[in-house]
Amino acid sequence: MPTGATGGARNPIGTFSEAVTLNDGTTVNSFAQEILLQKAIERGIAANKSELVVRSLLPVEDLKFTTEAPGVSLATATAYNTVVNVTNPNNKIIAFIGATYTGATPKTDPTTLVGFIRGSGGYIDIWTTYLVSGLQNPIGYTSSPVFMLNNDTFKVNYYNSGAASSASSLALIGLVVEPIGTVLSPNSG
């Protein structure tokens, strides 16, 4: 299990690669799904896995963006800009597992770091996303997902290394666990 995967101490700088396979051969996606299901049961969201669904992170539903299309304006130059500031509901846990640049020119995107804050504390993790922008396929996964539990208030800050009001095309990749029927009903129909 990667350091910090269950909320303990973690490396403060996330490392990325195009495909992450953990030491035991599992992918970050399947690893995060198992941790999400385990945490949901431990935290009383459901009694067993059959009552839960794991789905992709949705910007409007989960992060309170105004559109599902990726991209935000970063108002302040050479500083962190808060792009997400939400409180998870009682029935949802989120795992951030990666990031991708969706713009035409990812190498010039102003977002170079992503910081995650839980509650009123400091950063619990910072990802160096500018490394992803240089990949042929600008998508990267971390080996240490960031989990935001039910009832957690959290922020996601993008560091703008560009000018004021720069447009960022960075999109976060994540998974969400919640009771079946909250957003998806996979066994209906």
Image: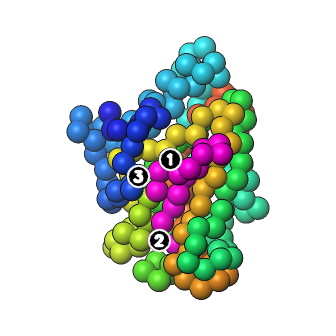
Which residue matches tag 1?
Answer: 124
Residue at disc 1, secondary structure: strand
Q: Nearer the viewer, residue 34 or 154?
A: 154
Q: Which three-letter amino acid code belongs to the residue tagged 3?
A: Pro
Quadrant where the C terminus sits is top right
Q: Which three-letter amino acid code belongs to the residue tagged 2?
A: Thr
Residue at disc 3, secondary structure: loop
- Residue 84 percent across, percent down from the top left: 67, 56
Asked whether, in this view, residue 73 is left or right of residue 104, the answer is right
Visible residue check, residue 166: no
Residue at 55% x, 78% y: name it.
78
Q: Earlier in the sequence, mark 2 or mark 3?
A: 3
Name the residue at the bottom extreme: 163
Which residue matches tag 2?
Answer: 112
Which labelled disc corresponds to residue 12? 3
Residue at 36% x, 48% y: name it.
11
Quadrant where the N terminus sits is top left
